[in-house]
Image (cartoon, rainbow, N blue to C red):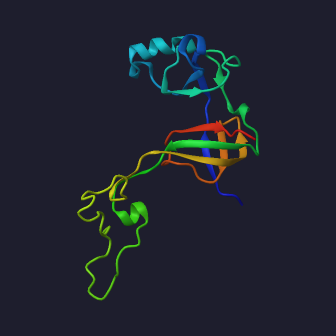
Amino acid sequence: MVPVTVIQAGPCCVVQKKTPEKDGYSALQIGFGDKKPKKVAKPVQGHCKAAGGRSFAVLQELRIDNTDAYQVGQDITLSLFKVGDKVKVSGISKGKGFAGVMKRWNFKGGQATHGSMFHRAPGSIGASADPSRVLKGMRGPGHMGAQKVTMKNLEIIEIREKDNLLLLKGSVPGARNSLVTLYQQKTA
């Protein structure tokens, strides 16, 4: 048995092609997930009109080397992947709010017994009279999670093209039903 994460991957529609001649770089803007047209702003509706007039819940731009293989309005499906391929998955990790140094940075903490009053605090953080300040980059308590995380070398175990489902070996960043971006892993 292999633990897998199921991802609904597409179909994604090509909304716009960006070229080095016109935009200075090469990229594709893709749309994912249907949205009612009345819930989409008029300028975005006009922007998506070239892609068949559909309205999308998410628009994202992906940089690629060559956009010639794609046309505006074309659907990108799971046919790009095959079983056994390695992929890279990027997403926003789960937010954990304000966290102390033991949870956030794996600090050891203080003694638990013998009347110690030092349990989960960070301890000393600054030097003496010189430099008489806390140096930048000091690991302390603060906001944890809710940032972009990329998991590399996840293997494709199964592809269910009829349902647009991709089964990846291992875990991906983010909560259930959150958005992630899949990238083909470059092979050396």
What residue is at 44 percent from the left and 45 percent from the top? 147
Residue 136 horizontal side relative to residue 76, left or right: left
In the drawing, does residue 45 fall left or right of residue 80? left
State the image coordinates of residue 55 (x, y, percent, origin top left).
Answer: 49, 20
Q: Position of residue 29 (x, y in %)?
A: 55, 22
Q: Is residue 114 above or below residue 127?
A: below
- Tell me which residue sits at (59%, 43%) in the image: 89
Q: Tell which of 9 and 68 is nearer to you.
A: 68
Q: Is residue 135 left or right of residue 35?
A: left
The front one of 58 and 118 is: 118
- The picture quadrant where one finds residue 15 is top right
User: In the rendered image of this protein, does residue 1 appear above or below residue 109?
Assistant: above
**Which part of the image, by quadrant, shows the C terminus?**
top right
Q: Is residue 132 visible?
A: yes
Most extreme residue toward the bottom is 114
Residue at 59 percent of width and 15 percent of height: 20
Image position, residue 35 (x, y; %) = 47, 25
Decide: is 34 above or below 184. above
Q: Quadrant of the N terminus?
A: bottom right
Visible residue check, residue 52: no
Please report the residue visible at 59 percent of the width from the left and 53 percent of the height from the top.
171
